[in-house]
Image (tube, rainbow, N blue to C red):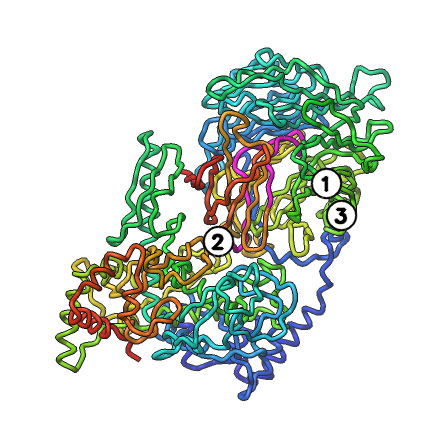
Amino acid sequence: MSTRKFPLKIHLKILCAALLGAFAAHPAPVRIAFAAEGETAPPPPMDIPYMHEEAMAAGIDHAYRGGWEFFVGGGVASFDCNGDRRPDLFLAGGTEPAALYVNRSPTGGALKFEQKDTGLPQRDLTNVSGAYPIDIDNDGHLDLVVLRVGENRILKGGPDCTFTQANRLLSFDGGRAWTTAFAAEFEQGMPFPTLAFGNYVDRAAPGSPWGTCHDNDLFRPQKRELTEDGKAAMPAYSERTALSPGYCALSILFTDWHRSGTPDLRITNDRQYYRGGEEQLWRVEPGRPPRLFTRSEGWRSVQIWGMGIAEADLDADGYPEYALTSMGDTKMQTLDEDAEEGRPVYRDIAFEHGATAHRPYAGNDLRPSTGWHAGFEDFNNDGKLDLFIAKGNVEQMPEFAAFDPDNLLLGGLGGKFTEAGHLAGIDLPTRGRGAALADFNMDGMVDLLVVNREHNVSLFRNLGAKSDPQSSDPSRARPMGNWLEIELAQKNVNLDAIGATISVKTGNTTRVRKVQVGGGHASGHLGFVHVGLGVSERAEIRVHWPDGTWSAPYRVFANNFVRIERGSERARYWLPE
Amino acid sequence: MRHERFRSAGKALTMPAVTMLAAIAMGPACAIAAEVEPWSERAIAVHIDASQYTGTLDAVALGHLRDRGEHLFTAKFTTEDGLGRPMATQAITPVKRKRPVQDGFSRTAGMDANACSSCHNEPSPGGAGNFSANVFVSEGFTNADFDSLDPQFSNERNTNHLFGAGLIELLAREMTADLQRLRAEAVRQARQSGEAVRVALVSKGIDFGQLTIEPDGMVDLSGLDGVDTDLVIRPFSQKGVMTSLRQFTINAMNDHHGMQAAERYGARWTGENDFDEDGKADELMPGDISALVAWQAGLKPPVPKVPDDSRWRAAAARGDVLFDQVGCNACHVRALPLNSLKFADPGPFDAAGTLRTGEVEGAIYDLALLEWTAALPRNAEGAVMVPLFGDLKRHRIADARIAALGNELLAQRFVDRDVFQTTELWGIASTAPYGHRGNLTTLDEVIRAHGGDATPVTKAYEGLAEADRSALIAFLKTLVIEP
């Protein structure tokens, strides 16, 4: 062997010189956003989740299709409709019928879904742009709010994924607008949720589509007394409150932006069609008419092609940050530290956090990106939230990238995000719209479903960390960080604790999650709340219940599904089959 | 084939090849390795390449790895190795200090030693420690920089011995597997029957309470006794809160020495490869930790000695009987059966932050290759009867009437301040002083200090005639660690 010809020290020095030379030859780490310009960014040090696309193999064959009205929308509701706690899927189809897929995935195994006939008439299932799950009538079965180009529907959930059309039962007029957004909250003291609908262009208005945005709608449940057993009768939504002016909303979200305990309604709007419009924040106080925050109250005018909203309290200070997708730069807003109490003064931190995602990170198309659904999740269970953004050209807009892969921005040191979509394997040539970020096979790792325009959905199973970032061998995936999945439960009213805040403490680190219905892009998820824990093997959970009371601390071990019932002395674990 | 390859390399002591591989693994750190001289002040000349120790190691490979582990256990680490953690606390998860410490060494908040054997040294490396070698256990999150002995900031603990630790971990693994298998079977039954199933959690004769499983898979944890809610038996530390030697080693290396293992404090989890900011990257590589684990796992367990003195033999025989009659053996179970001596590293029940099965190819240390295992008794089924005098279960050991062992103010990792894992008595005669703080000088004192769940046994002991109490002590004094 030639290795024996040289003394050890010389040998090592030669090797080290070679290695150090190689290191020196590498460019300094650059933001991945510039990778498309021909530079090679080093893979980030954290785990890269191996996202394995298996929609067809899983039994899902479903695209979002249609003409101009369906350039936007394309949502999915992810929720458990048969009591097995696995997320089932209701997929919008545009001009094609929406479809219900029941989750049959074995624990930790390949994803498997089975289409189920809803038994609903075709007219209810076509022209669907999106859907959100929520238990409106507190019967323990999640209902579906179905957004349509035309009359919106509320489908009352029953056992074993059965649904009945419930507009009349709920005295709900679904209107005739082009609805693209939804959010819901339980206002203080109310036994049923308040429903908000975001509408897009009013096609019937003169001069449409330019400057003809439809008003948005707020439906408050008519107040009803609780029955003797503590339950309430069926709500009525016969009173519509117009949120005017509307500026062509594409995502709306009730959010407790300043820890007041009373969420307000944030709306992201598409500047493509509005005139004189901007992003909006409606003050929604119980028993009072909603009103817009004004410039004098600190609200600054921001005009973007707003497509989706994601909320997360990235620094766990109690004041959430917001990712707002758009054409070109994604915005990331944080409440300005100098803002006075109660004044919604936001500043953009997308650039300093490396989260602008303004153009494709792969391929050679340098035109700006078009962002849709946004969601924060911890895909690699390293304890830091990541940001997923669905991307895709509206249709054939020449000023924007044609090949525009979805983003997976991994959270890292100092709050910086690093693009890893290409390394994870989600950089497909599809036009993404809505999405569901959920653990479909109950293995503690977040999977991903993306609804694509004119193309089958993408369904990515998270296999674990790539042992080699460049590897495409799924058998070499390795375990990632620790995790928890948490389910909250209340009795009688607001059973799923919409509006609750979950605080997960490990050591000095607190991770915060909200239970919300709304945001994203025409897509909602209800079910286990996932929290990556990194290297922590135990955690203390506290729940800030929707009525403002704090729970006792619950001590749990990592890598468990946890159910916390309000008032219970200890948490319980749930074990999947 | 891997062993052959290793063996040929090992016999020829082709350090260039081994070192080269290590240097490649180290990346930029290889520049340091290249400068190693015989008078170097580094304790770690070259990191151990874990990929050279995979599969079931043969005796030569295991011996070589254990030799490396012993070197690391007894080595006095220096700042050249990365000793010290100026910007990291003692916490078991990576936590930054708010400001650098003024003095690297501190007998309270640590780092408090530069060698494992500084404390684990009685009667030989791997052993226990005297009162002067006590450590101050703080979780290292809040008040991480305490400089006071005030017990509101830390729990003062005496140093445990590690002899037989491999057998202890193997027992814990088998018991964890038993408990989790019982739980899985109950889940299956509940789902199939549509009715709640109550399952008794008993492994190797030790009763850990019960679980109730609802048909939908929901688990009622309120009936558990002496085990964590994830049913992982954590056999190490006086509280029973460490899963494995690997986890314990990584914790201790950071806490006591500021030597940070890459598998927990490295860039994968922290974004930095010099998390403690002492100028040394990746201070301990997975192979280094493996060597330390292999050495500790292979430490010969204590075995009772037969006294030369005939009076002692007679008294010990009497005490042996009294040990059971009084009820000591209810918790200090004499022996537990162990089915396999194959020690997988990494192990099956660690969580992220400690290398896990599936992350690397891993190695198996067959403890049967070590001479001492031949002398271990076996039961009729062929299982090794591990004479630990313990049950790997936690019990409440102090109360208002007998509070001596409840001398801590801080709970540790969800375990109440007056709850501890049963101390294994093997080697007790070689590890005075006694008690969690090491502040009880005689066996009689520590027996009388048992309160809480052990109160009836303590009363029974106190009710013995003086000669019988003496006989019981005579028996315990035969439980020695052979140096």
Q: Mark 3 highlights which residue?
A: A337
Farthest residue toward the bottom? B39
- Whether marks 1 and 3 lie on the same chain: yes
Residue type of the residue flagged with mark 2: Glu
Farthest residue toward the front? B401
Label 3: which secondary element: loop
Question: Where is residue A13 drawn, in percent x and y?
Answer: 62, 80
- Gap between marks 2 and 1, in whole Å? 41 Å
- Gap between marks 2 and 3, in whole Å? 33 Å
Question: Where is residue A503 drawn, in percent x and y?
Answer: 57, 44
- Residue A433 visible: no
Q: Nearer the viewer, mark 2 or mark 1?
A: 2
Looking at the rendered structure, the number of numbered marks drawn on it comes to 3
A255 or A551: which is nearer to us?
Answer: A551
Q: Compared to A394, does A174 lie above or below? A: above
Near mark 2 (Cα within 10 A), the count class, few <14, some 14-19 or many ≥20, is: many
Q: Mark 1 highlights which residue?
A: A403
Q: Compared to B98, does A445 lie above or below? A: above
Dot 2 or dot 1: first in sequence order is 1
Residue type of the residue flagged with mark 1: Phe
